[in-house]
Image (cartoon, helix red, strand yellow):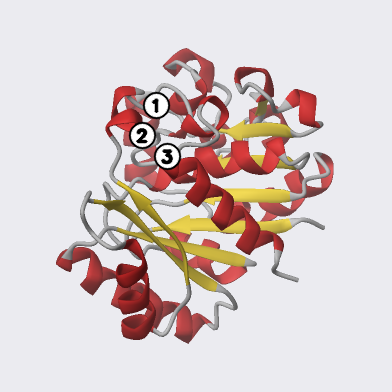
Protein backbone atom coordinates (compact mmCIF):
# COMPACT_ATOMS: atom_id res chain seq x y z
CA UNK A 1 0.00 0.00 0.00
CA UNK A 2 1.25 3.48 -0.88
CA UNK A 3 1.56 6.53 1.34
CA UNK A 4 -1.16 9.10 1.93
CA UNK A 5 0.22 12.65 1.76
CA UNK A 6 -2.15 15.38 2.91
CA UNK A 7 -1.62 19.09 2.19
CA UNK A 8 -3.49 21.41 4.53
CA UNK A 9 -3.54 25.03 5.62
CA UNK A 10 -5.56 26.90 8.20
CA UNK A 11 -6.28 29.76 5.81
CA UNK A 12 -6.75 30.04 2.07
CA UNK A 13 -4.25 31.63 -0.28
CA UNK A 14 -1.18 29.80 1.00
CA UNK A 15 -0.39 28.18 -2.36
CA UNK A 16 -1.37 24.72 -1.15
CA UNK A 17 -2.79 23.53 -4.48
CA UNK A 18 0.26 24.75 -6.39
CA UNK A 19 2.55 22.85 -4.04
CA UNK A 20 0.51 19.65 -4.27
CA UNK A 21 0.44 19.81 -8.10
CA UNK A 22 4.19 20.38 -8.32
CA UNK A 23 4.88 17.66 -5.74
CA UNK A 24 2.82 15.19 -7.78
CA UNK A 25 4.86 16.06 -10.87
CA UNK A 26 8.10 15.68 -8.92
CA UNK A 27 7.19 12.26 -7.55
CA UNK A 28 6.05 11.07 -10.97
CA UNK A 29 9.32 12.26 -12.53
CA UNK A 30 10.99 9.92 -10.04
CA UNK A 31 9.04 7.02 -11.52
CA UNK A 32 6.17 6.87 -9.02
CA UNK A 33 2.45 6.38 -9.58
CA UNK A 34 0.64 9.31 -8.01
CA UNK A 35 -2.97 10.41 -7.69
CA UNK A 36 -4.26 13.75 -6.43
CA UNK A 37 -7.74 13.94 -4.94
CA UNK A 38 -9.09 17.48 -4.75
CA UNK A 39 -11.29 17.33 -1.67
CA UNK A 40 -11.69 21.11 -1.58
CA UNK A 41 -15.22 20.72 -2.94
CA UNK A 42 -16.16 24.27 -1.92
CA UNK A 43 -13.44 25.96 -3.98
CA UNK A 44 -11.73 23.41 -6.27
CA UNK A 45 -8.75 24.42 -8.35
CA UNK A 46 -6.07 21.74 -8.74
CA UNK A 47 -7.38 20.79 -12.19
CA UNK A 48 -6.28 24.17 -13.57
CA UNK A 49 -2.60 23.30 -13.08
CA UNK A 50 -3.03 20.38 -15.48
CA UNK A 51 -4.79 22.40 -18.17
CA UNK A 52 -8.24 20.99 -17.49
CA UNK A 53 -11.29 23.15 -18.13
CA UNK A 54 -14.58 23.07 -16.26
CA UNK A 55 -16.08 20.59 -18.71
CA UNK A 56 -13.10 18.28 -18.12
CA UNK A 57 -13.98 17.84 -14.43
CA UNK A 58 -16.96 15.54 -15.06
CA UNK A 59 -17.31 12.93 -13.68
CA UNK A 60 -15.84 14.37 -10.52
CA UNK A 61 -15.38 13.60 -6.85
CA UNK A 62 -18.85 15.06 -6.37
CA UNK A 63 -20.43 12.37 -8.55
CA UNK A 64 -18.58 9.70 -6.60
CA UNK A 65 -19.75 11.12 -3.27
CA UNK A 66 -23.34 11.18 -4.55
CA UNK A 67 -23.08 7.56 -5.72
CA UNK A 68 -23.28 8.35 -9.44
CA UNK A 69 -19.93 6.80 -10.38
CA UNK A 70 -16.98 4.92 -8.95
CA UNK A 71 -13.97 6.88 -7.80
CA UNK A 72 -11.94 5.22 -10.57
CA UNK A 73 -14.35 6.65 -13.15
CA UNK A 74 -13.74 10.10 -11.67
CA UNK A 75 -9.96 9.77 -12.06
CA UNK A 76 -8.23 10.92 -15.21
CA UNK A 77 -4.64 10.34 -16.29
CA UNK A 78 -2.94 13.74 -16.72
CA UNK A 79 0.57 12.37 -17.20
CA UNK A 80 0.80 13.40 -20.86
CA UNK A 81 0.26 17.01 -19.82
CA UNK A 82 3.52 16.93 -17.85
CA UNK A 83 6.83 16.79 -19.70
CA UNK A 84 9.26 14.20 -18.43
CA UNK A 85 6.74 12.14 -16.47
CA UNK A 86 5.95 9.35 -18.92
CA UNK A 87 9.60 8.93 -19.89
CA UNK A 88 10.49 8.39 -16.25
CA UNK A 89 7.88 5.65 -15.91
CA UNK A 90 5.69 7.63 -13.54
CA UNK A 91 2.01 8.47 -13.80
CA UNK A 92 -0.14 11.27 -12.42
CA UNK A 93 -3.87 10.80 -11.96
CA UNK A 94 -6.33 13.44 -10.79
CA UNK A 95 -9.74 13.15 -9.17
CA UNK A 96 -11.08 16.70 -9.49
CA UNK A 97 -13.95 18.30 -7.66
CA UNK A 98 -16.67 19.85 -9.79
CA UNK A 99 -16.37 23.52 -10.65
CA UNK A 100 -20.05 23.64 -11.60
CA UNK A 101 -22.03 26.22 -9.63
CA UNK A 102 -24.98 23.87 -9.13
CA UNK A 103 -22.72 21.10 -7.84
CA UNK A 104 -20.90 23.40 -5.42
CA UNK A 105 -24.18 24.84 -4.18
CA UNK A 106 -25.67 21.39 -3.68
CA UNK A 107 -22.70 20.08 -1.73
CA UNK A 108 -22.72 23.18 0.48
CA UNK A 109 -26.42 22.78 1.21
CA UNK A 110 -26.67 19.00 1.48
CA UNK A 111 -23.16 17.92 2.43
CA UNK A 112 -22.01 14.36 1.84
CA UNK A 113 -21.09 11.21 3.72
CA UNK A 114 -17.52 11.82 4.83
CA UNK A 115 -16.90 8.09 5.38
CA UNK A 116 -17.24 7.67 1.61
CA UNK A 117 -14.01 9.64 1.26
CA UNK A 118 -12.05 7.15 3.35
CA UNK A 119 -13.50 4.25 1.39
CA UNK A 120 -12.68 5.99 -1.88
CA UNK A 121 -9.10 6.68 -0.83
CA UNK A 122 -8.49 3.03 0.00
CA UNK A 123 -10.14 1.80 -3.17
CA UNK A 124 -8.29 4.07 -5.58
CA UNK A 125 -4.93 3.31 -3.97
CA UNK A 126 -5.49 -0.37 -4.65
CA UNK A 127 -7.06 -0.11 -8.09
CA UNK A 128 -4.47 2.31 -9.49
CA UNK A 129 -1.59 0.62 -7.65
CA UNK A 130 -0.45 3.96 -6.26
CA UNK A 131 2.82 4.78 -4.60
CA UNK A 132 1.40 8.06 -3.32
CA UNK A 133 -2.09 9.43 -2.81
CA UNK A 134 -1.99 13.23 -2.45
CA UNK A 135 -4.99 14.90 -0.84
CA UNK A 136 -5.63 18.62 -1.30
CA UNK A 137 -7.92 19.71 1.54
CA UNK A 138 -10.23 22.65 2.14
CA UNK A 139 -8.59 25.26 4.41
CA UNK A 140 -9.57 25.37 8.07
CA UNK A 141 -10.77 22.68 10.42
CA UNK A 142 -13.82 20.83 9.13
CA UNK A 143 -15.08 17.25 9.17
CA UNK A 144 -13.42 16.39 5.84
CA UNK A 145 -10.14 17.99 6.94
CA UNK A 146 -10.14 16.13 10.24
CA UNK A 147 -10.59 12.82 8.43
CA UNK A 148 -7.74 13.58 6.02
CA UNK A 149 -5.43 14.68 8.83
CA UNK A 150 -6.20 11.57 10.85
CA UNK A 151 -5.47 9.07 8.05
CA UNK A 152 -2.35 10.79 6.68
CA UNK A 153 1.03 9.11 6.61
CA UNK A 154 2.61 12.52 6.09
CA UNK A 155 0.86 15.83 6.70
CA UNK A 156 2.18 18.96 4.99
CA UNK A 157 1.00 22.11 6.77
CA UNK A 158 1.41 24.98 4.34
CA UNK A 159 1.92 28.42 5.87
CA UNK A 160 3.04 31.86 4.79
CA UNK A 161 5.38 34.03 6.89
CA UNK A 162 2.39 36.02 8.10
CA UNK A 163 1.08 36.48 11.65
CA UNK A 164 -2.42 35.30 10.79
CA UNK A 165 -0.89 32.12 9.39
CA UNK A 166 1.31 31.79 12.48
CA UNK A 167 -1.75 31.70 14.72
CA UNK A 168 -3.67 29.36 12.41
CA UNK A 169 -0.72 26.99 12.21
CA UNK A 170 -0.61 26.79 16.00
CA UNK A 171 -4.27 25.75 16.03
CA UNK A 172 -3.69 23.17 13.29
CA UNK A 173 -0.75 21.62 15.09
CA UNK A 174 -2.67 21.41 18.35
CA UNK A 175 -5.46 19.57 16.52
CA UNK A 176 -2.83 17.26 15.00
CA UNK A 177 -1.45 16.43 18.42
CA UNK A 178 -4.91 15.60 19.75
CA UNK A 179 -5.56 13.41 16.70
CA UNK A 180 -2.09 11.85 17.13
CA UNK A 181 -1.16 12.66 13.53
CA UNK A 182 2.17 10.84 13.14
CA UNK A 183 4.27 13.06 10.87
CA UNK A 184 3.29 16.71 10.46
CA UNK A 185 5.77 18.77 8.45
CA UNK A 186 5.74 22.52 7.93
CA UNK A 187 6.18 24.06 4.50
CA UNK A 188 6.74 27.81 4.48
CA UNK A 189 5.59 29.37 1.21
CA UNK A 190 5.80 32.78 -0.48
CA UNK A 191 8.87 34.02 1.37
CA UNK A 192 9.73 37.52 0.16
CA UNK A 193 13.11 38.26 -1.38
CA UNK A 194 15.70 39.42 1.13
CA UNK A 195 14.52 37.16 3.93
CA UNK A 196 16.86 34.48 5.26
CA UNK A 197 15.14 31.16 4.53
CA UNK A 198 17.32 29.23 6.98
CA UNK A 199 16.57 31.66 9.78
CA UNK A 200 12.84 31.50 9.05
CA UNK A 201 13.00 27.69 9.13
CA UNK A 202 14.91 27.64 12.43
CA UNK A 203 12.46 30.05 14.05
CA UNK A 204 9.46 28.06 12.83
CA UNK A 205 10.90 24.79 14.13
CA UNK A 206 11.68 26.37 17.49
CA UNK A 207 8.23 27.96 17.77
CA UNK A 208 6.16 24.98 16.67
CA UNK A 209 8.44 22.08 17.65
CA UNK A 210 7.83 20.74 14.17
CA UNK A 211 10.22 20.06 11.31
CA UNK A 212 10.24 22.44 8.34
CA UNK A 213 10.48 20.43 5.15
CA UNK A 214 11.01 23.37 2.79
CA UNK A 215 10.87 27.14 2.44
CA UNK A 216 9.58 28.27 -0.96
CA UNK A 217 10.26 31.79 -2.21
CA UNK A 218 7.72 34.22 -3.60
CA UNK A 219 8.21 33.93 -7.35
CA UNK A 220 7.30 36.16 -10.27
CA UNK A 221 7.99 33.19 -12.55
CA UNK A 222 5.29 31.21 -10.80
CA UNK A 223 2.84 34.09 -11.02
CA UNK A 224 3.45 34.40 -14.76
CA UNK A 225 2.27 30.81 -15.20
CA UNK A 226 -1.14 31.97 -13.89
CA UNK A 227 -1.72 28.50 -12.39
CA UNK A 228 -2.01 27.09 -15.92
CA UNK A 229 0.86 24.63 -15.47
CA UNK A 230 3.37 23.34 -12.94
CA UNK A 231 6.79 24.91 -12.78
CA UNK A 232 8.56 21.70 -11.75
CA UNK A 233 8.48 19.99 -15.15
CA UNK A 234 9.39 23.10 -17.15
CA UNK A 235 12.06 24.58 -14.85
CA UNK A 236 13.71 21.80 -12.87
CA UNK A 237 16.50 24.05 -11.59
CA UNK A 238 14.16 26.80 -10.41
CA UNK A 239 14.41 27.64 -6.65
CA UNK A 240 10.81 26.49 -6.19
CA UNK A 241 11.51 23.19 -7.95
CA UNK A 242 14.52 22.61 -5.72
CA UNK A 243 12.37 23.12 -2.63
CA UNK A 244 9.75 20.73 -4.03
CA UNK A 245 12.55 18.18 -4.38
CA UNK A 246 13.34 18.66 -0.68
CA UNK A 247 9.73 17.89 0.23
CA UNK A 248 9.81 14.76 -1.95
CA UNK A 249 13.09 13.68 -0.36
CA UNK A 250 11.62 14.09 3.11
CA UNK A 251 8.50 12.13 2.19
CA UNK A 252 10.62 9.34 0.66
CA UNK A 253 12.52 9.05 3.94
CA UNK A 254 9.34 8.23 5.87
CA UNK A 255 9.01 4.54 6.59
Res 106 quadrant in image: top left
- Establish if 52 lies above or below 199: above
Pair 3/2: label in front: 3
Q: Residue at x 81, y 31 (%)?
A: 89
Q: Position of residue 169 (x, y in %)?
A: 31, 71
Res 43 quadrant in image: top left
- Establish if 143 lies above or below 174: above
Residue 55 bears which disc, if any? none
In the displayed structure image, the side of residue 90 where residue 208 appears, left or right:
left
- CA gap between label 3 and label 2 equals 21 Å
- Dot 1 falls on a residue whose secondary structure is loop
Q: Position of residue 239 (x, y in %)?
A: 43, 43
Q: Position of residue 71 (x, y in %)?
A: 68, 37
List the single residue furthest toward the left.
Answer: 163
Q: Is residue 152 visible?
A: no
Q: Residue tagged by mark 1?
A: 99
Residue 18 bears which disc, if any? 3
Amino acid sequence: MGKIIVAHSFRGGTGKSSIIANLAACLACRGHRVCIVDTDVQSPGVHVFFGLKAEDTTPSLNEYLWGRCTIEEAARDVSERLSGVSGAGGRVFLVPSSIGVNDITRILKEGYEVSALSEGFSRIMRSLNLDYLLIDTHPGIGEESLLSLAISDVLLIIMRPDYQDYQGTSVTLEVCRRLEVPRPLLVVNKLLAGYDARRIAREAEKTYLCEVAAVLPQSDDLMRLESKSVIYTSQRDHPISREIDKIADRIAAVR
